[in-house]
Amino acid sequence: MRTERFAPSPTGPLHLGHAFSALTAWDHARASGGQFLLRIEDIDQSRARPEWEARILDDLHWLGIDWPEPVLRQSTRLPAYRAALADLWARGLIFACSCNRRDIAAALSAPQEGAEIPMGPDGPIYPGTCRAQGRGPDLPFPPEGVALRLDMARAVGTLRGPLSFDETGEPGQGRVALDPARLLAEVGDVVLARRDMGTSYHLAVVLDDAFQGVTHVTRGRDLFEATQIHVVLQSLLDLPTPVYHHHRLIRDAAGKRLAKRDDARAIAKYRAEGASPADIRAMVGL
Ligand code: GLU
């Protein structure tokens, strides 16, 4: 059965961009007789708030969306994330990293002053400072007080055959092939466990989509580049790759992408002004 999901982070209001994702996933599930699941992405406990979660759920219900209870909360899934990390650690595919942002910026700007810093889906491409030290399986897991990064070169080296995924959304429909050279140069050693969280968005989303049996992932175009990371992780962890649908982004009046905390486009604001769910659909072009 087709299984779609919407996975908000309860760190701010539901805005038009979120509504577009949720309604698109919901419509796809309904049209195919599939199911729609909700997942609360609350791994960042310093920013997640129960009040935001309650308001997001209320806005989604108001839009006419419902889902089976109980919803999955990522904060309850830490043992699963840790088990996957232990597995990758034992296989020597992740390493401990004690760099902070400033260390990374300094390492990247040191060789050629003024040269452009290569950026990946998560920011600057990691310069490899800690790659040669602190790695499993020689050291015990988990190392304390450090982040864990994927060793992309080793990961690419262990992949069996070329990787790809099916895309049905904006960036061009069809089969998207992953390019190992691009993974190294334009993605690099991404963080799989933040020092303060014990996981990262990439690891959690991949494990939870598989755990919930998600067959189709609907989300914004801004996450298209991150999908390469997810497909690599699915391969390393022996998980299925869903079909991806990356949709156009809803922009604000000035043409800028809506920020997470853009209260001006909050569904609550339109509700207070008397808009109907049909008005919201029309605003996002559905
Ligand atoms: N929690 C993520 C967000 O709100 C979800 C991204 C995804 O759908 O994979 O951006």
Image (tube, rainbow, N blue to C red):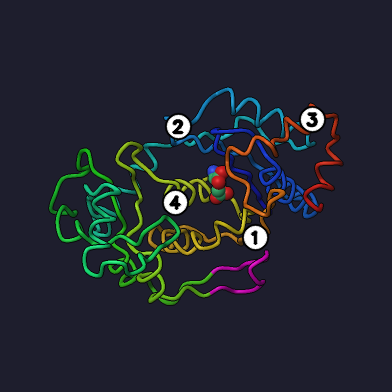
42 up-or-down from 233: above or below: above
> Disc 4 and disc 2: Cα gap in Å?
16 Å
Q: Please state which of the two labelled residues, at mark 3 or mark 4, is closer to the viewer.
A: 3
Magenta stretch bounds: 165-176
**CA separation in Å, label 3 and label 1:** 28 Å
Image point (29%, 40%), residue name = 195
Question: Reading the chain from its start, which is encountered first: label 4 or label 2?
Answer: 2
Alpha carbon distance from label 2 to label 1:
27 Å
Q: Name the residue under label 1.
A: 245
Q: In this view, does 8 lie to the left or right of 279?
A: left
Residue 160 falls in which quadrant of the image? bottom left
The kind of residue tagged 3 is Arg
Element type at mark 1 = strand
Give whichever of discs 3 and 4 has the lower sequence position. Answer: 4
Outermost residue on the front side: it is: 114
Horizontal relation, residue 206 to residue 244: left or right: left
- Residue 49 x %, y %: 52, 26
CB contact under 8 Å: marks 2 and 1: no
Q: Residues within 10 Å of mark 1 (few under 14, many from 20)?
A: many
Residue topped by disc 3: 271
Amino acid tagged 1: His
Q: Mark 2 is on which residue type?
A: Thr
Q: Nearer the viewer, residue 20 or 252?
A: 252
Identify the residue under disc 4. Answer: 202
The residue labelled by disc 2 is 76
Q: Can residue 213 be seen in this view?
A: no
Alpha carbon separation for disc pair 3 and 4 = 33 Å
